[in-house]
Amino acid sequence: MAKFSCHCGYVIDLVESPAKEEFQLIPERLLESLWSGIADGTVTESVFFDSIRDQGGRAVIECPNCARLWVQNALDGGSFNYAPFVREADVINGTYFPPDVAE
Ligand SMILES: [Zn+2]
């Protein structure tokens, strides 16, 4: 993925990977299983990253402009298929204004 356009209009440059805006959401059970494998020497670096990708890990992108999180959909795992999330507290407190309606 080279560039990612956020709803706020900010374009996130993901050419250099991993970019500082990229994160991984990893199932706790998988993480603990991989950690055990690392500890006993059965999980290599490539197995570690392949397992995260193939066993439920989801890529997350954080927009540095609006703090919106984009979480990769688990259903198809498509690298460009992300769902946006904003912080509920910001919406409830009235401190979040979508850029397309803010003045
Ligand atoms: Zn944004």
Image (cartoon, grey):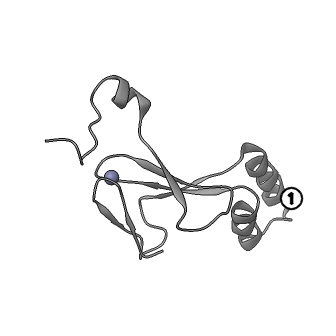
Residue 77: x and y in percent read 65, 63
Q: In screen coordinates, is 57 left or right of 96?
A: right
Q: In screen coordinates, is 92 left or right of 28?
A: left
Residue displayed at 62% across by 56% down: 58
**Where is residue 6, by image quadrant?**
bottom left
Residue displayed at 28% across by 42% down: 98
Q: Say how many tags the image has.
A: 1
Q: On screen, 47 above or below 71? A: below
Q: Residue furthest left?
A: 103
Viewer-proximal residue, 37 or 64?
64
Residue 41: x and y in percent read 84, 64
Residue displayed at 77% across by 51% down: 30
Residue displayed at 67% across by 56% down: 57
Viewer-proximal residue, 97 or 35?
97
Q: Is mark 1 within 8 Å of ligand 1?
A: no
Q: Residue furthest front?
A: 101
Q: On screen, 13 above or below 21? A: below
The residue where tag 1 is placed is 40
Residue 95: x and y in percent read 27, 30
Q: Quadrant of the C terminus?
A: top left
Residue 17: x and y in percent read 48, 72
Q: On screen, 68 above or below 78? A: above
Mark 1 is surrounded, within 10 Å at the Cα level, by few (under 14), some (14 to 19) or many (20 or more) other residues, namely few
Q: In screen coordinates, is 16 left or right of 49?
A: left
Callout 1: SS: helix
Q: Give amino acid for label 1.
A: Asp
